Amino acid sequence: MRIKKKWAAMTVLAAMLLSVVPVAQAEQGQPAPVIRNLALGLDYKWSEEPEASHPDGSKKLTDGKHGLLNMSDPAWIGHVKKMTREVTFDLGESKSISKINARFLQDWPTNEALVPLTVSMYVSDDKVNWGCSGWIDNKGIETCLLDKLNAGNVKSFIHEVEAQSGKHISNEAANVLLRDARTL
């Protein structure tokens, strides 16, 4: 009886493996989607310059080079003091963005370099009104939230985000907005 169960299990496993092969082969025949780096070579502005020990002297964020897993690699840019940093990229015109990537270095176990606790990506068509693309589907609510923040009314902002979460503000956006607002 035990031998029959073992062979039955091996037969099922073999059948499962063989049924996957044609799918994998079919996927290999598909052309890879074309991904373009819209920021490659672009200028950008820092809200606060990186540390002198890890400077950004030559558009490191948009040069297309990735830093090695080593703090001494000159491709890395460094910041300290747990302060918010903003980096603004101007794509020159409205463009469709499907993905935004960011890479960070954490030096484990010495912890001389740590990843940021929060990273938020915002987009704007006019360099005045900023938001997370697709996160808020109602311009009136977006404007209302911006007005509350500009007036320094953080409690009212938090209340409005909580009320609109899952309705006109995606749950993901609400979580990020609430987390960031509560640090103000």
Image: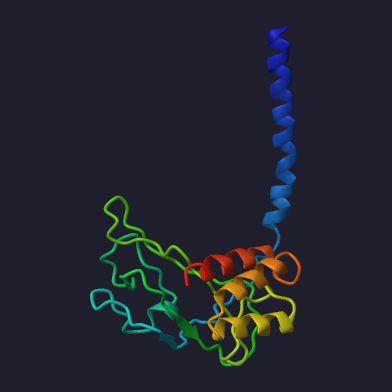
Taking the spot 25% from the left edge, 66% from the top edge, the residue there is 72
Quarter of the rendering containing residue 62: bottom left
Front residue of 72 and 81? 81
User: Is residue 155 in view?
Assistant: yes
Image quarter in which the N terminus is found: top right
Q: Is residue 42 left or right of residue 164?
A: left
Residue 86 in picture, x, y percent from top left: 44, 80
Residue at the left extreme, as displayed: 53
Q: Is residue 95 left or right of residue 54?
A: right
Residue 134 in picture, x, y percent from top left: 69, 74
Taking the spot 64% from the left edge, 64% from the top edge, the residue there is 172
Taking the spot 56% from the left edge, 79% from the top edge, the residue there is 153
How many numbered marks are there?
0
Q: Is residue 14 left or right of residue 99?
A: right
User: Is residue 33 in view?
Assistant: no
Residue 81 in picture, x, y percent from top left: 31, 70
Residue 10 in picture, x, y percent from top left: 69, 23
